[in-house]
């Protein structure tokens, strides 16, 4: 059952308007909203929302009594189900329920049944340096131990909502009895349905934008006159928070993570301080950074957020960091270089917007290369459209070749020259086919340009379409469950990318005919415009606002990354960051980098044919790294040195790979063999093959 209480912040946290909490609470001077408190027990829980290990593994979504008006509890359950399945391979063959999952205890044994963990949730939101309504949520399990208090910060992966790290950071931390400090980092699946003027609230329910005003999770900053003018020309369109908040939220991801930790301290001190043993001279000290273990750990964009938080941590809130496949924009310095097997990487450390917009241009042509003909989902790239993209690339001087085969192979080579490892070659087709590259390029273009939804930046909008790809009203609005099911970066939940300026537009972007070429070439004109924005001063400034500098303040840190990652390539992120950190901190550096072969970015793709036989779950190593960091902090155990972990794919026929076992997954070693070691001299990073 669940009890729902609302407390005004003034009564709940007792913060002076411009003074931080005496217990190391929320930053002073920032605007806060109410705190929602919900108790989850019995047929509900913190970790699985009552679904348990079995319910999370089910491909059938949790039921909603009234699909047009889900309750907050139903939306939360659906949200947790969707986020678990988006980040974890939940199939038995992939290791779920055997090697990891809610039922696996701290010793790695299947003893926890369905894995329900009762406790209490606290949710609030705040504005951080102009970024509006950043959601903060703290979970405190019933078995939280006041004698050994711990907090684990889990900012969301991708552009997901506040539960975006529950299946990764959340599961590990709750099993340990730690409080978990989540944040959506100012992104999250907040939507604004412009035709109906409907917006998402922080609990996922809906309201009219005029009534919600500043309490909305997100609403487009439009006057009523501007909204009406826009939908008159562009009906059935949507604004999304990450793309259209005009905040560039990535610049505050580190601060959002720190704010979540500070909120966790306030929660513990306000509602869980009874019986705390922390006293001095008869005075209760409460939970403080000095007596509470704090680990910041997350995946992808969340991994980048914990790195940024460690760099920005001037108050000593964070004791250690574990980042998995972190998306970071590295502030490159002279002297930072990378070699693999003695071969230098030409241009390491490019920012996300650079390599993503390059991939968005080149991948549909490269997918046609005969050398990658057996790529998973290669059929998702329409050969005629990909060939037309090759033609446009040749005309632009970006690739060469007299035949389609030569052009496609050269496009694939150009991707490698731009920083992708050969290990990623088989993934370009699926990443473009699922519109990953286009979606990320467009979302970050809007965020970095601080564009309004009405700008239709580079000739794109976001809206619902019919079977022919034309803008059309949806059969059912995506809004009632958008907060739960949308990943924050359309196309998602029926909201698609629309090529407004295509010769045959407006039409779904994959079907767009470019005006400049007269060809159906995956809307080359829009993709080229997104790429050209890299030279814009506003974009360059926005990227600079997000850069990490390598100064981790001497915190013990483990970064775990898959060598095959095609979304966040190791050559632009974790590898150069290792060198940058060494230059910045020298002997003070306590960073180790673990690179895992046959691991890529999307765990949810692992059950698919071709993924199952070739790739292993990086999630397994993220948990292993967290276990090693825990033993280091609590028992003084040594941390592993930087190394490459050589795994063994499952093999077998695509779609029928044998079950994953520990034989596929060698451990991270405290004493790796010389041939496995990654070395750093000055800023030069040297990796074995």
Image (spheres, grey):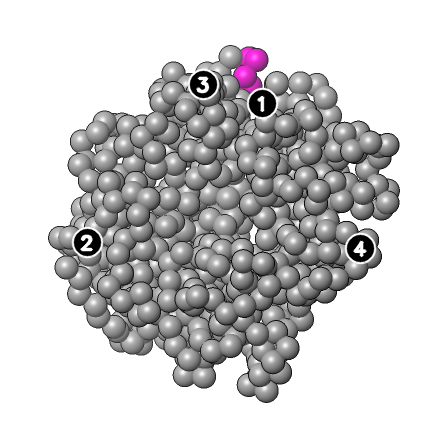
Could you tell me if the residues under marks 2 and 1 are in contact, i.e. CB atoms within 8 Å?
Answer: no
| Residue 451 seen by the camera | yes
Residue 61 is a magenta residue: no
Choose the circle earlier in sequence order: 3 or 2. 2
Against 604, residue 128 (above or below) is: below
| Residue 416 seen by the camera | no
Q: Residue at x 28, y 28 (%)?
A: 98
Choose the circle earlier in sequence order: 3 or 1. 3
Position of 221 compared to 71: left or right? Answer: right
The secondary structure type at the circle numbered 1 is loop
Position of 306 compared to 437: left or right? Answer: left
Residue on which disc 1 sits: 678
Against 614, residue 348 (above or below) is: below
Residue 257 spot, x, y in % from top left: 45, 54
The secondary structure type at the circle numbered 2 is loop
Residue on which disc 2 sits: 44
Q: Residue at x 14, y 59 (%)?
A: 1
Residue on which disc 3 sits: 652
> Disc 2 and disc 1: Cα gap in Å?
45 Å
Image depth: mark 3 or mark 2 in front: 3
Front-most of 136 and 466? 466
Q: Residues within 10 Å of mark 1 (few under 14, many from 20)?
A: many
Residue on which disc 4 sits: 518
Could you tell me if the residues under marks 3 and 2 are in contact, i.e. CB atoms within 8 Å?
Answer: no
> Disc 1 and disc 4: Cα gap in Å?
49 Å
> Disc 3 and disc 1: Cα gap in Å?
31 Å
């Amino acid at each position: 059952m669940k009890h729902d209480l609302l407390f005004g912040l003034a009564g709940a946290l007792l913060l002076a308007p411009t003074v931080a909490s005496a217990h190391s609470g929320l930053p002073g001077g920032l605007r806060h909203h109410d705190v929602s408190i919900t108790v989850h027990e019995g047929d509900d829980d913190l970790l699985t929302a009552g679904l348990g290990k079995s319910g999370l593994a089910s491909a059938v979504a949790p039921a909603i009594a009234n699909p047009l008006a889900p309750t907050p509890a139903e939306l939360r359950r659906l949200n947790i189900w969707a986020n678990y399945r988006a980040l974890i391979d939940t199939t038995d063959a992939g290791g779920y329920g055997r090697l990891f999952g809610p039922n696996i205890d701290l010793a790695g044994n299947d003893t926890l049944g369905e894995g329900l963990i009762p406790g209490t949730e606290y949710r609030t939101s705040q504005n951080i340096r102009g970024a509006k309504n950043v959601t903060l949520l703290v979970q405190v399990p019933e078995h939280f131990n006041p004698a050994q208090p711990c907090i684990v910060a889990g900012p969301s992966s991708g552009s997901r909502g506040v539960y975006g790290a529950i299946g990764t950071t959340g599961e590990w931390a709750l099993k340990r009895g730690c409080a978990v400090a989540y944040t959506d980092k100012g992104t999250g699946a907040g939507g604004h349905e412009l035709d109906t003027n409907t917006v998402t609230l922080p609990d996922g329910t809906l309201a009219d934008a005029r009534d919600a005003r500043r309490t909305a999770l997100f609403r487009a900053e439009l006057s009523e006159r501007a909204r009406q003018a826009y939908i008159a020309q562009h009906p059935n369109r949507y604004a999304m928070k990450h793309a259209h908040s005009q905040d560039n939220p990535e610049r505050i991801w580190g601060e959002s993570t720190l704010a979540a930790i500070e909120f966790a301290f306030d929660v513990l001190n306000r509602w869980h301080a009874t019986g705390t043993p922390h006293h001095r001279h008869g005075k209760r000290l409460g939970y403080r950074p000095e007596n509470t273990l704090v680990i910041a750990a997350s995946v992808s964009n969340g991994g980048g957020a914990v790195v940024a938080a460690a760099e920005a941590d001037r108050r000593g809130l964070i004791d250690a960091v574990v980042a998995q496949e972190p998306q970071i924009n590295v502030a490159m310095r002279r002297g930072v270089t990378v070699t693999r097997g003695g071969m230098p990487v030409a241009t390491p450390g490019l920012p996300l917007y650079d390599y993503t917009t390059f991939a968005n241009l080149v991948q549909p042509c490269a997918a046609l290369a005969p050398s990658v003909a057996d790529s998973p989902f290669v059929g998702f790239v329409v050969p005629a459209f990909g060939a037309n993209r090759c033609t446009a690339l040749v005309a632009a001087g970006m690739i060469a070749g007299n035949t389609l085969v030569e052009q496609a192979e050269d496009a694939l080579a150009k991707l490698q020259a731009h920083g992708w490892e050969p290990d990623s070659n088989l993934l370009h087709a699926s990443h473009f086919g699922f519109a990953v590259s286009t979606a990320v390029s467009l979302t970050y273009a809007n965020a970095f340009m601080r564009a309004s939804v009405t700008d239709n930046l580079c000739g794109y909008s976001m809206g619902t379409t019919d079977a022919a790809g034309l803008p059309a009203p949806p059969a059912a609005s995506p809004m009632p469950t958008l907060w739960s099911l949308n990943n924050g970066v359309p196309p998602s939940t029926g909201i698609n990318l629309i090529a407004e300026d295509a010769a045959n537009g407006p039409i779904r972007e994959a079907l767009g005919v470019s005006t400049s070429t007269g060809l159906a070439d995956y809307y080359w004109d829009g993709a080229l415009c997104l790429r050209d924005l890299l030279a814009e001063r506003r974009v360059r400034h926005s990227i600079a606002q997000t850069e990490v500098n390598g100064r981790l303040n001497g915190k013990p840190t483990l970064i775990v990354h898959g060598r095959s990652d095609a979304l966040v390539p190791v050559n632009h992120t974790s590898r150069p960051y290792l060198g940058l950190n060494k230059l910045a901190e020298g002997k003070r550096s306590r960073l180790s980098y673990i690179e895992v072969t046959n691991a890529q970015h999307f765990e949810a793709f692992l059950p698919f044919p071709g993924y199952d036989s070739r790739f292993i779950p990086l999630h397994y190593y993220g948990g292993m790294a967290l276990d090693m960091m825990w033993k280091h902090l609590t028992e003084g155990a040594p941390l592993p040195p930087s190394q490459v972990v050589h795994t063994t794919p499952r093999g077998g026929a695509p779609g029928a790979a044998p079950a994953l076992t520990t034989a596929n997954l060698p451990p991270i070693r405290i004493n790796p063999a010389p041939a496995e070691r990654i070395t750093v001299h000055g800023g030069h990073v040297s990796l074995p093959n």
